[in-house]
Image (cartoon, rainbow, N blue to C red):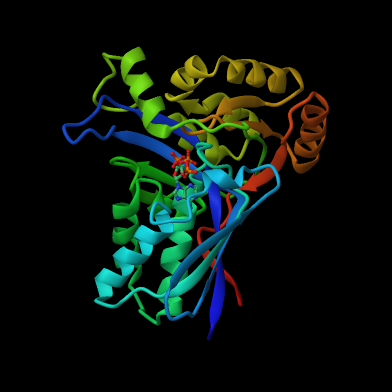
Amino acid sequence: MTGLTVRAPAKVNLHLGVGAPRDDGFHPLVTVYQAVGLYDDLTAREADDWQVGATVSDWIDPAVVPLDGDNIVDRAADLLAAHHGIERSGELHIAKEIPVSGGMAGGSADAAAALVALDRLWGAGTSDEDLLALAARLGSDVPFALLGGTALGTGRGELVAPVADRGTWWWVVVPSAVGLSTPEVYRHFDKMFPDAPSAPVPADALLEAIASGDPWALADALHNDLEAPAIDLRPELGRLIETGEAAGALRGMVTGSGPTCVFLCGSADHARSLAAEMSGAGNAVVLAANGPVAGAHLVSYA
Ligand code: ATP
């Protein structure tokens, strides 16, 4: 085998309960992730040295994807190589469709894809348990990007447990031209909510809504504690959500730390017509995606 392509999905947080910062500085989370059909594809090929390249969808600024040691796939490769006591090698190419600094965990998706792809390329045979542990060291959202589907995340988000989800949920996704830094949004949360309880809001209502399979019940139960700080930093997001709801979304919200906004729809047709209406209303980029979808997985041999 000389190469392979692994596909990894973006996530939306259907529920994101955030508690007061822990002693280690991380915020405790109770979150329900859903992997949605917006993907980065990572191709890894055998090579004597190490190289990382990227191409991006035409609406993504290529300058915001680092290609030097700051790319998270570099750290993923280092961790996996160190775990097996081998030298890293390979030519990696990221084809990016997930917004950067958009609150959809695009970097985490690439990190998960790199772990899966390099494990195969190097014939390392890493156990699932070890892959999840390495993923957790790379970032709070990386274990979920491996798992995919719909899952409950606790700890700082890295402790993931699959949630039975028989529904197909339809989303219209509206990224912003300029990203928001996740640490900045958390700092703003701390400023706005200095008395946040140490235990995050539980996800019971959301989990019941998922079990019901009813999009209206899900619309009612969606919850994001980072929405208020994201909107305070970017008031136009509040207006975007109002516009989407006025155009017929069952519910609009900021996903994760934003600034991407997602709009829940009742069906694929509803998502297509809402996307068309929101594009017509002057939003430069409007996408439609369904969830849940699989986590990082092999799609082809390159
Ligand atoms: P999250 O939802 O997990 O907070 P995000 O989607 O808001 O993440 P990302 O796109 O995952 O944000 O990461 C943004 C930051 O990470 C940027 O500063 C970017 O330069 C850096 N970065 C490093 N590697 C990558 C990568 N492979 N893809 C995107 N951003 C990357």
Camera-nearest residue between 194 and 54: 54
In which image quadrant can residue 284 be found?
A: top right
Q: Is residue 91 left or right of residue 243?
A: left
Q: Residue at x 60, y 40 (%)?
A: 213
Residue 259 pos. (x, y %): 54, 29
Q: Residue at x 42, y 76 (%)?
A: 49
Q: Identify whether 224 is placed above or below 194.
A: below
- Asked whether residue 168 appears in the rendered view, the answer is no
- Asked whether residue 42 appears in the rendered view, the answer is yes
Residue 14 pos. (x, y %): 51, 35
Q: Residue at x 35, y 45 (%)?
A: 140
Q: Residue at x 67, y 49 (%)?
A: 57
Camera-nearest residue between 52 and 119: 52
Q: Identify whether 32 is placed above or below 78.
A: above
Residue 122 pos. (x, y %): 40, 80
Q: Identify whether 72 is placed above or below 29.
A: below
Q: Identify whether 28 is placed above or below 147.
A: above
Q: Is residue 260 left or right of residue 182?
A: right
Extreme-left residue of the structure: 23
The quadrant of the image that shows the C terminus is: bottom right
Residue 167 pos. (x, y %): 61, 46
Number of marks present in the image shown: 0
